[in-house]
Image: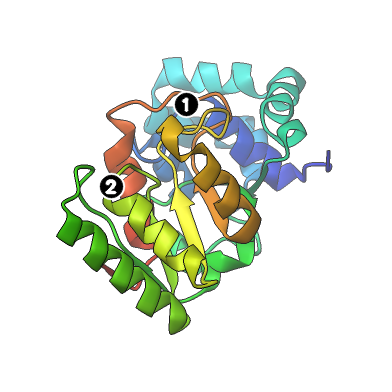
């Protein structure tokens, strides 16, 4: 496992507090206030501002979570399973996401992280695909990939699956954005597809390793798909 910088430790602490970027927005309010992740570790210097943003109970929880144990748990959940991550402050974190109003503070990934900075198009749609839908999705994905665009989708059944496969079948690049942690691929039918994407493309998520795929996570996942892409089909 690699050693975490103080800036990474700060963002990790904030992430592990559960003030999710996509849901409560509290993480992003702190992100807009602090200049570096290490400022979160120096919470006493920013106590008044943090209490104003979080409230006293959540501030006390943040203080409690600023511990060695939190960092070890994070590393044990993620880094030892072959997963790496970028923080919103990292070199390599995509400019397109950083400019969003609610960027994910941490992106976990497996695969070619350089794809985050490539020109890309998202292809998303229904899980119950007609023959026409399947064929036209694959045609778009194939031709766009052959012209050097990275195909971004959500690894779901239906249109997403045909989009990823269309890119891979012509040697193109694809990014799968998940609505849960990397411990368990959802849907299970796409486990082999996920393994291929991890080898030849990139899988990303803002959720820690064991996080379940919950229904309310999918709309927040979609903002990342859109944010990474020049356009959405």
> Quarter holding the N terminus?
top right
- In terms of image quadrants, where is residue 218? top left
Which residue was labeled with disc 1?
A: 18
Dividing the picture into quadrants, the one containing residue 96 is bottom left
Proximity of marks 2 and 1: CB atoms separated by less than 8 Å: no
The outermost residue toward the front is: 131
Residue 141 visible here: yes
Q: Is residue 1 above or below residue 87?
A: above
Q: How far separated are the C-alphas under marks 2 and 1?
A: 31 Å
Picture coordinates of residue 39, whole percent (x, y): 63, 43
> Mark 2 against mark 1, which lies toward the viewer?
2
The C terminus lies in quadrant: bottom left
| Residue 51 coordinates in the image, percent (x, y) | 44, 27
Residue 18 at x, y percent in the picture: 47, 26
What secondary structure is marked by label 2? loop
Q: State how many labels appear.
A: 2
Residue located farthest toward the bottom when viewing the structure as drawn: 147
Compare residues 77 and 176 and report the one nearer the observer. 176
Estimate how packed mark 2 is, as few (under 14), some (14 to 19) or many (20 or more) residues with alpha carbons within 10 Å. Answer: some
Give the side of residue 143 with respect to residue 173, left or right. Answer: left
In the image, what residue occupies the spot 40% across and 46% down? 155
Between discs 2 and 1, the one toward the N terminus: 1
Q: Residue at x 72, y 33 (%)?
A: 81
Q: Residues within 10 Å of mark 1 (few under 14, many from 20)?
A: some
Residue 90, percent from left and from top: 64, 57
Residue name at image x 58 percent, y 29 percent? 209
Along the viewing direction, whichever of 166 and 209 lies nearer the viewer: 166
SS type, badge 1: loop
Residue 100 seen anywhere in this rendered image of the structure: no
Could you say which disc has been placed on residue 158 in the image?
Answer: 2
């Amino acid at each position: 496992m690699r050693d975490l910088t103080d800036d990474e430790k700060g963002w990790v602490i904030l992430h592990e507090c559960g003030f999710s970027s996509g849901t409560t927005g509290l993480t992003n309010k702190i992100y807009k206030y602090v200049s570096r992740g290490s400022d979160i570790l120096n919470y006493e210097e920013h106590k008044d501002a943090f209490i104003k943003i979080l409230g006293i109970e959540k501030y006390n929880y943040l203080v409690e979570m600023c511990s060695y144990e939190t960092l070890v748990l994070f590393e044990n959940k993620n880094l030892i399973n072959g997963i790496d991550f970028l923080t919103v402050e990292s070199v390599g974190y995509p400019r397109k996401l950083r400019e969003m109003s609610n960027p994910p503070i941490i992106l976990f990934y497996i695969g070619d992280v350089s794809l985050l900075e490539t020109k890309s198009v998202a292809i998303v749609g229904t899980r119950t695909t007609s023959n026409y839908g399947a064929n036209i999705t694959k045609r778009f994905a194939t031709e766009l990939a052959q012209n050097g665009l990275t195909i971004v989708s959500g690894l779901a059944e239906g249109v997403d699956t045909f989009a990823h496969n269309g890119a891979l079948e012509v040697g193109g690049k694809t990014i799968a954005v998940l609505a849960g942690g990397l411990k368990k691929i959802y849907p299970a039918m796409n486990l082999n597809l996920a393994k291929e994407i991890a080898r030849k493309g990139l899988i990303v998520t803002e959720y820690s390793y064991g996080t379940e795929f919950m229904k309310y996570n999918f709309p927040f996942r979609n903002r990342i798909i859109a944010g990474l892409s020049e356009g959405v089909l």
